[in-house]
Amino acid sequence: MEALRSIIQELPTAYIVLDALDECTQRDELMEMLIAVTGWQLPHLHLLVTSRRERDIEMSLEGFVDERSRVCLQSTLVDKDIQRYVRQRLSDDKRLRKWGKEAAMIGKIETALINGAKGMFRWAVCQLDALGKCVNRKMLQQALATLPPTLDQTYDRILATIDNDHSQYALRILRWLVFSARPLSVDEVAEVVAIDVKREPIFDCDEVLEDSLEILNICSSLVTIATENDDGRRKPREVVALAHYSVKEYLVSERIWTGEAAMYGMQDNVCHDFMSSGCLGYLLQFQQSELEPE
């Protein structure tokens, strides 16, 4: 912190932007750092933070952020951005492009999603992903008429409709992504699918995904693949991550246990036991292969 302060003092003007405070897993530490930074009282330092409205964050900020400096984005202010996003997806997404040819159909989709989103971009993203799976007008109209009203219900529907053949694979993938201490590469996740601590041997090489991009199909709308750059020290690599912080939030919440997707509910102690056993089983396969006679 002192190093940061020294650097800022040397600059004519400095800006610090912290996006999505509510998604920080070490929230208390971050809030203490913010309080320390504001205590420097540097007139040329400008600080911008964004967050969903959560009471503990609001209480922490009340001490040094006055009412005039707060901007609450009402859902109506986000509606136009959601509309632009919907139009862009209908134009560019090859799965949705078929519905973007008629102005009337575009209008129906826009109206349904803007009214249902209530300012939540993530909700709109998930609904468009689902609409992309519709193959005819009847399916599309039925999907628009039965849109889940909340993000929780959206995730519940996504999880509940995962194919039975893929459900255990999806559970394994999501479990490792939620509790892994570091980002996992696509190759690592492709092997995670083959780890099952309830059997012996724990790792089955025949279950490793032949095409790692199948991860996106198994956990559609729930995960994403991104390129991770390590400041030039290593070659960029593709990593798998949860598509949004709210995915993890729902998977570990008590709310999931009351819905159709209860089998995907996660408890940290159970998952950590699963992962530690899985790691040991995976490593022991190499020792076993060395002991086997040629």
Image (cartoon, rainbow, N blue to C red):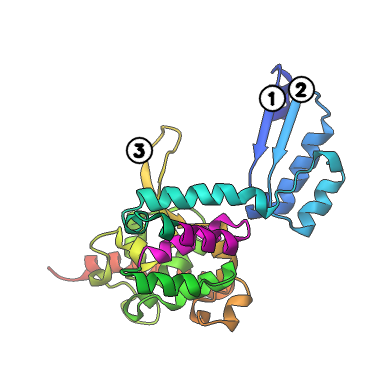
Numbered mark located on residue 44 in the image: 2
Q: Residue at x 32, y 58 (%)?
A: 98
Residue 181 coordinates in the image, percent (x, y)? 52, 56
Magenta residues: mostly which secondary structure? helix
Q: Position of residue 126 (x, y in %)?
A: 48, 62
Q: Identify the residue under disc 3.
A: 235
Stretch in magenta: 107-133
Seen at 85% across and 47% down, the residue is: 62
Q: Determine whether the residue tagged by mark 2 lies in a helix, strand or loop.
A: loop
Instruction: Tell me, yes or no, if residue 106 can be seen here.
Output: yes
Image quadrant in which you'd find residue 114: bottom right
On screen, residue 248 above or below 277: above
Q: Give the left or right position of residue 23, taking residue 59 as reference.
A: left
Of the 4 image quadrants, the one containing the N terminus is: top right
Q: Give the residue type that dot 3 points to.
A: Lys
In terms of secondary structure, where does tag 3 sit? loop
Cβ–Cβ under 8 Å for marks 1 and 2: yes
**Few, some or many residues within 10 Å of mark 3 (<14, 14–19, 20+):** few
